[in-house]
Amino acid sequence: MGLFDFFKKKQETPEAQQALDKGLEKTKEGFFSKITKAVIGKSTIDDEVLDNLEEVLVTSDVGVSTTLKIIERIQDRVARDKYVGTDELNRLLKEEIQALLAENNSNDFESFAYGDHKPYVIMVVGVNGVGKTTTIGKLAYQLKQAGNKVVLGAADTFRAAAVDQIKLWGERVGVRVVAQAMGSDPASVAFDTVQSAVANGDDVAIIDTAGRLHNKVGLMNELGKIKNVMQKIVPGAPHEILLVLDASTGQNAIEQCKQFTQATDVNALALTKLDGTAKGGVVIGISDQFKIPVKYIGVGEKMEDLQLFNKREFVESLFK
């Protein structure tokens, strides 16, 4: 079974759908209780309802610019349809959010081209504490389940805990880990990992990197160096630069996304810890604002709970 077929199959299982629904429970509870308050005592969608709805979306961490786009679309629908009542607001909102996300330039994971790259090299970036290492472990598990040979590179050499965590995940999932001593040159670890992947015939190499943002120039230089050494072995590597963000940090996740996209060529996003937060609306804002595919969402503790992000399924679940 190919990578695409495996992930498609996984995404369609009732278990995956149930995990998504459960993972969004806190966001749904907060979201709908706010919407109910926004329309209380109103039968039609007037300016006051729209003002209240704007506040609901902003406080649900959808983000100001995305919220304004959604409100504008709702206004247009109300003006067009004339007799839209507040009882239809949820349906309108769901349709317009889905339409907005469908129009942006980011595709759902179904279009992910594994291509002819072997090894397919993924460089993972993100600040400490967002669930980066856990995401790497869960991703390695999913890829291995699909029949791929996976190797992990412990290139976050500034924290002993980071190297140890990657090793633990390697043991847990049953994949090889390439590591050096703490304080080693991260680019050297990345070079060794990719070289090892080529020699071993691995399908995927996942490289962890240090999660520091205090010096963007330093981060850019370091990530640039890591990319350059990997390209000496596999031209075009890394094929994917995956930025991991903690959804529970809301607007802070959007700020981190800005910083990292300025520092390196991020072309995929993973949003973690959705099950522990009411700030799930941030997924909508990030997907709309950055036009970078949100590829994975973390909706629980189990290894299977790193899911593919599908815009339509996400919004459907949010409005169930």
Image: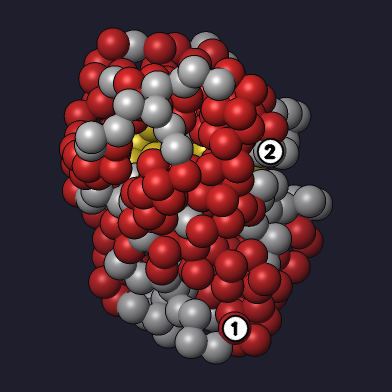
Instruction: Identify whether 138 is placed above or below 87.
Output: below
Q: Residue at x 56, y 51 (%)?
A: 68
- Write down the residue under mark 1: 216
* Marked residue nearer the N-terminal end (1 or 2): 2
- Write down the residue under mark 2: 104
Instruction: Identify whether 59 is placed above or below 164.
Output: above
Place residue 24 in its image quadrant.
Answer: top left
Question: What is the total number of numbered labels drawn onto the structure image?
Answer: 2
Q: Residue at x 55, y 21 (%)?
A: 82
Left/right placement of residue 142 relative to residue 294 reads: left
* Residue type indicated by callout 1: Lys
Task: Confirm whether residue 161 shows in the render.
Answer: yes
**Element at badge 2?**
loop
At which x and y percent is residue 179?
42, 65
Q: Nearer the viewer, residue 293 or 140?
A: 293
* Residue type indicated by callout 2: Asn
Left/right placement of residue 308 relative to residue 20 reads: right
Q: Nearer the viewer, residue 46 or 182?
A: 46
